[in-house]
Image (tube, rainbow, N blue to C red):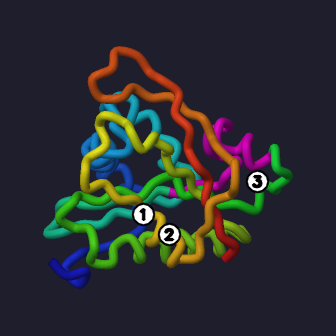
Amino acid sequence: MNIEDIDVRALTGPDLEAALDDVAQLRITVFRDWPYLYDGTLHYERQYLDTYRDNPGALLVGAFHDGRLVGASTSTLMEDHADAFAAPLRAIGLPITSILYGAESVLLPDYRGIGLGHRFIDLREAHARKMARTHVAFASVVRPDDHPAKPENARTNDAFWQGRGYQPLPDVLAHFSWRDLGDTAETEKALQFWMRAI
């Protein structure tokens, strides 16, 4: 698989509308895996993705192979995202109106390692500049090393993020709840913030 075979584009208007259910299903599929272990529902995903529909500060990028959605990346102005994510940044004195929040980038396994992650970050950072933002941030779930669902071959994306200039903000965590696979109720998770100036 080569990146030249993949059509990566920002989705707006009718294109965004047409892709919403596929983006929702992609998020559910990818986030079932380690470390998110997310037991998502199409109903929740549709509500979440509605925030991107008519928001001029939001970015929804789709990666298509032969017309099939294989990856997606979302971003929004920090003040437009859930307050559970903005509050930790406010608490350390960061002006959230200077930050674009990279909510997620998800790719099906067969499409990883060919440069799509870089393409998503390039588009996210270009959007941040267009929105007059000086920083891009995201948050990554923190799981204990001895978690029973952790695969033996698990690896983080830390080296990739650091190679793109992102660094973790020490002790700056968001807390958000979702239901893990096999659980009957939501539980709160910690998510580590990463950020870079652009």
- Determine whether the residue tagged by mark 1 lies in a helix, strand or loop: loop
Q: In this view, does 192 lie to the left or right of 45?
A: right
Disc nearest the viewer among 2 and 3: 2
Q: Are marks 1 and 3 in contact (CB under 8 Å)?
A: no
In the picture of the structure, the residue carrying the numbered disc 3 is: 96
Whether the magenta-drawn stretch holds residue 77 is answered as yes
Instruction: Answer with the quarter of the image where residue 116 lies.
Output: bottom left
Q: Position of residue 115 (x, y in %)?
A: 33, 78
Disc on the earlier residue, 2 or 3:
3
Residue 11 lies left or right of residue 85; in this view the side is left
Q: Name the residue under label 2.
A: 161
* Quarter of the image that includes the C terminus: bottom right
* Numbered tag placed on residue 157 in the rendering: 1
Q: Residue at x 50, y 78 (%)?
A: 163
Crowding at dot 2, Cα within 10 Å, few <14 / some 14-19 / many 20+, comes out as some
Q: Magenta stretch?
A: 75-90
Task: Name the residue located 69 percent from the left edge and 48 percent from the top edge.
Answer: 172
Structural distance between the alpha carbons of marks 2 and 1: 6 Å
Q: Position of residue 5 (x, y in %)?
A: 19, 80
Magenta stretch encompasses residue 93: no
Instruction: Give the Cα distance between marks 2 and 3.
Output: 21 Å
Query: Pointers 2 and 1 in contact (CB under 8 A)?
Result: yes
* Front position in the image: 176 or 153: 153
Q: Is mark 2 on a helix, strand or loop?
A: helix
Q: Which amino acid does label 1 sit on?
A: Asn
